Image: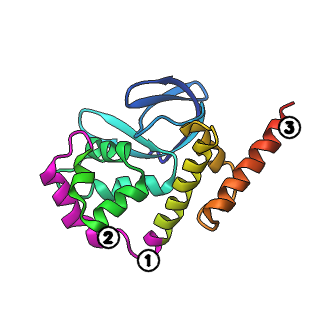
Amino acid sequence: MIALVRGEIAERGADHVIVDVRGVGYKVFVPRHPASDSVTLFTHHVVREDAQQLYGFESREELALFELLITVPNVGPRAALSLLSVSRPSALAAAIASGDVAALARAPGVGKKTAERLIVDLRGRVGKGERDQSLRAAAVDDEAASALQALGYTAAEALAALRGVPGAGAATTEERVTAALRAQGRAGVAGR
């Protein structure tokens, strides 16, 4: 079982990346392309009679949600990946918890019936206890990323800046933005 892939992106496809891990290229299906070329992806390894596939995620939380989604009948890895490609894990979990069929059905290949099935099967399993805390933390990071974008960062640069600072989940939006700006300022000075 392959649980993690760390290396350099050698190639990017429409729905996958090829990660070079010490001379071996792993094709990893991803919901969105990583911001940098040096990656660590938490993976879900699917072994079938006719194929082996890796699905990769930049966070353990995203992987956990993917693995929860594929427990629903008729929701395979491709549909789960499609759901994660159009919504952040926090928004996806919130849509399931609130019963928002339209938000779930936006994903390519996920129709109204599948969205309803996701809600019925997962509503009681998302949005409780620790998940509420992680959803709030993700919301803070989403707000911080939006604030950085308003300051001129691209979406990828904003996410990379936030990943580079400690305090995810324990800080306010302002604290996350300030920490990211300070870290970027130090990186800019160090690079000179």
Viewer-nearest of discs 3 and 2: 3
Label 1 sits on a secondary structure element that is: loop
Residue 147 screen position, x and y as percent: 59, 50
Residue under the point 63% across and 37% down: 152
Distance from Cα at disc 3 to Cα at disc 2: 46 Å
Is residue 119 covered in magenta?
A: yes
Q: Are marks 2 and 1 in contact (CB under 8 Å)?
A: no
Distance from Cα at disc 2 to Cα at disc 1: 10 Å
> Which of the pair 139/129 is nearer the observer?
139
- Mark 2: amino acid: Arg
Question: Where are the magenta residues, as a range?
Answer: 107-132
Q: Which class describes the residues within 10 Å of circle 3: few (<14), some (14-19), or many (20+)? A: few
Q: Are marks 3 and 2 in contact (CB under 8 Å)?
A: no
Disc marking residue 129: 1
Describe residue 177's horizontal placement relative to residue 124 as left or right.
Answer: right
Viewer-nearest of discs 3 and 1: 3
Distance from Cα at disc 3 to Cα at disc 1: 41 Å
Label 3 sits on a secondary structure element that is: helix
**Residue at label 2?**
125
**Scheme of colours in the image:** rainbow
Residue under the point 50% across and 26% down: 25
Marked residue nearer the N-terminal end (3 or 2): 2
- Mark 3: amino acid: Val
Is residue 145 covered in magenta?
A: no
Marked residue nearer the N-terminal end (3 or 1): 1
**Residue at label 3?**
189
Q: Which class describes the residues within 10 Å of circle 2: few (<14), some (14-19), or many (20+)? A: few
Residue 40 screen position, x and y as percent: 57, 42
